Amino acid sequence: MVSNTIDLIQEELPVKQEPFIISGDVKTGLVLVDLVNGFCTVGAGNMAPRFPDKQIAEMVDESARLARAFCERKWPVYGFLDSHDPNVPEHPYPPHCFAGTHESKLVPALQWLENESNVTLRCKDCIDGFLGSIEKDGSNVFIDWVKNNQIKAILVVGICTDICVLDFVCSTLSARNRHHLPPLEDVIVYSRGCATYDIPVHVARTSKDLIAHPQNLMHHIGLYIAQGRGAKVVSEVLFDDKENNREENVISHY
């Protein structure tokens, strides 16, 4: 039944996706949303998967691949870390990712980012990372990151597709449209680089405190809404190595 529902929704609400090729011609920044243990590592907390999860595992692998590629090129990377005060609940979600705990740390595959000079890590205590980047003086660390690096496109990956990723994408698009984010032009969401959690309908029915959240369905809906707001959703991310090829051709010529 769930499979039939997803097939119907994908047919009626299609998400147009194409491969995305990154080159050095357009200044691109990578945004990592909440790749922390509390959301990604099996058994790490109330919001973490209880069992190995294929969608989340692929999201982590793809995010790590992209982070490595960006850091090798010394391109800008901005990472959000969900990090909460235990005394400030985030309804309707259960307690999660308390500041300074294992849950709020980067997943093992990305912990090396802490030592990279081109990486900006931002702890946030709310769903929307754009709002979570606002300082007490009213400045915004994310806006400054875009302006200081003269970023024209951001590539967004992370978790959850329909919650933290979507809220950040929507706020960023609104800020761009209001000319608060020059020179940013494009917000790109990588579908395989995003994931969400899974609470099947039959599980939700066993508890009055649970809300059904079918993983594949909500992942698709998150992508669809992001696209409707103006984001570009892509199915694959490749790197144009024409500069390297040029150098190889020069060397082989001699």
Image (cartoon, rainbow, N blue to C red):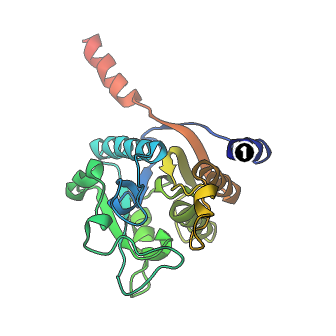
Q: Is residue 90 left or right of residue 113?
A: right
Label 1: which secondary element: loop
Under mark 1, the amino acid is Met
Q: Which residue is mark 1?
A: 1
Q: Residue at x 70, y 45 (%)?
A: 6
Q: Position of residue 81 (x, y in %)?
A: 36, 66
Q: Residue at x 60, y 63 (%)?
A: 204
* Residue that sits furthest to the left in the current view: 115
Using the image as rendered, state which of residue 244 and residue 113 is in the foreground: 113
Using the image as rendered, state which of residue 221 and residue 70 is in the foreground: 221
Categorize mark 1 by other alpha carbons within 10 Å: few (<14), some (14-19), many (20+): few
Quadrant where the N terminus is found in the figure: top right
Based on the displayed image, in which of its 4 quarters is residue 69 positioned? top left
Quadrant where the C terminus is found in the figure: top left
In the rendered view, tell whether residue 93 sits above or below residue 244: below
* Residue that sits furthest to the front in the current view: 206
Q: Position of residue 226 (x, y in %)?
A: 63, 57
Based on the displayed image, in which of its 4 quarters is residue 102 positioned? bottom left
